[in-house]
Amino acid sequence: MVVAEWWSGEALLLQHLYSCSALSPFSVTRRIGHPYQNRTPPKRKKPRTSFSRVQICELEKRFHRQKYLASAERATLAKALKMTDAQVKTWFQNRRTKWRRQTAEEREAERQQANRLMLQLQQEAFQKTLSQPLQPDPLCLHNSSLYALQNLQPWAEDNKVTSVTSVASVV
């Protein structure tokens, strides 16, 4: 009985849909694929343009002098190189992107080199402080707190602190 009720409900729903839209079960068309695919036919991709060595050389020379071209300059250069305005524009856009990437990589390499140099200099300075004892400052000899601070080297193997009075008597 439950199956019969379900079937009759399903049948009523289908009958209602067909009567409202005046469609027969055979005239219903289904779209296949994404709905945006059927709007316009896909454009064929243009093949990659190959430039001659002379064209590339002239473009590179101009880019080295000038990173951006005004529309009149671009048109003149395109005419001289027998290229379209769009080709020159695209070439300059791509070349600027490459230039920015290269300069960013160079700056990063310089930054890393500077960090390595700083670490090396810090290590050398640290090794120098370990190997050469500090000369006592005359002001620190008479003040026990300053003397202790001046001689504070927790990394040193010999951590003996001489009293202010014994150091003062030596000097």
Image: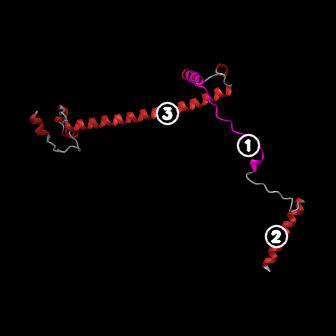
Helix, strand or loop status at disc 1: loop
* Res. 152 mark: none
Q: CA distance from mark 2 to mark 1?
A: 41 Å
The residue carrying mark 1 is 42
Q: CA distance from mark 3 to mark 2?
A: 66 Å
User: Which quarter of the figure has residue 150?
Assistant: top left
Helix, strand or loop status at disc 2: helix
* Res. 10 mark: 2
Quadrant housing the N terminus: bottom right
Q: Position of residue 98 (x, y in %)?
A: 55, 32
Q: Are marks 2 and 1 in contact (CB under 8 Å)?
A: no
The residue carrying mark 3 is 104
Q: Are marks 3 and 2 in contact (CB under 8 Å)?
A: no
Q: Label 1 sits on what residue type?
A: Pro
Q: Closer to the N terminus: mark 3 or mark 2? A: 2
User: Which quarter of the figure has residue 170?
Assistant: top left
Instruction: Find the magenta span and give its range.
Output: 35-61
Mark nearest the camera among 2 and 1 is: 1
Q: Residues within 10 Å of mark 2 (few under 14, many from 20)?
A: few
Query: Which residue: 27% across, 35% down?
Result: 125
Residue 36 is one of the magenta-drawn residues: yes
Q: Label 3 sits on what residue type?
A: Ala
Looking at the image, residue 16 lies above or below residue 107: below
